[in-house]
Image: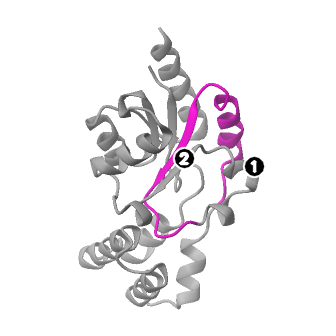
Amino acid sequence: MIKAVVFDCFGVLTSDGWLPFKSKYFGHDKQLLQDATDLNKQSDAGLISYHDFIEAVATLAGVTNNDAHRQIEDHVADSQLFNYIKTLKPTYKIGMLSNAAENWLSEMFNPEQVALFDAVALSYESGYIKPQPEAYKVIAERLGVDVEDCLFVDDQERYCIGATDIGMKAVRFSSTEQAISDINRLLAESKS
């Protein structure tokens, strides 16, 4: 039975500036794309600072640090999804699991939105990056539920597969309306 709904941050709860940046500057060159992806993973794991990550990808892209930072930090919270999360809150625990290099929650979301989360697990502080099984286990543990009792929502298929591989239910986010519909369906199925 589903007891917790866990949301990814970038690309789900907020728009994601990194993926468009990566595609724009590195999509044409396989090696640059790999180098940028590796830098992002190192930053998400806390192996390099976010400042060093921005500096390195700016150099790879041939843009200023400020320009890289501005483009990568282009996030807009999904207010429709947050309003939906409020309706889940009385019945389900709410979590956030994200590959993130730092904790920017208070900068990206208002205090009311941040307060909706019963637990947050960010890769830089846990040391585990989705789709590592441990990443999903950390958020379930922080929520006080078994992984099998979690529903995970992410825009990246490989991260949804990582969740289902350890027993979570998963919804791949492609739009707010679609995600809400799929979440409602799985929650209803879980009750029956």
Q: Position of residue 90 (x, y in %)?
A: 67, 27
- Magenta span includes 130: no
Residue 156, labelled with which disc?
none
Task: Please state if 21 lies on the left or on the right of 30 as rendered.
Answer: right
Q: Quadrant of residue 30?
A: bottom left
Q: Residue at x 58, y 29 (%)?
A: 92
**Mark 2 vs mark 1, CA separation in Å:** 14 Å
Q: Nearer the viewer, mark 2 or mark 1?
A: 2
Q: Quadrant of the N terminus?
A: top left
Q: Position of residue 149 (x, y in %)?
A: 42, 28
Which numbered disc flags the more N-terminal residue, 2 or 1?
1
Q: Residue at x 48, y 72 (%)?
A: 21
Task: Please state if 113 lies on the left or on the right of 59 as rendered.
Answer: right
- Magenta span includes 101: yes
Q: Which kind of residue does numbered mark 2 sit on?
A: Ala
* Residue linked to disc 1: 112
- Look at the picture and state if 39 lies above or below 183: below
Q: Which residues are magenta?
A: 76-103
Q: Position of residue 72 (x, y in %)?
A: 54, 72
* Residue linked to disc 2: 119
> Mark 2 Cα within 10 Å, few/some/many (few <14, many 20+)?
many
- Look at the picture and state if 131 lies above or below 23: above
Q: Position of residue 61 (x, y in %)?
A: 42, 85
Dot 2 falls on a residue whose secondary structure is: strand
Dot 1 falls on a residue whose secondary structure is: helix
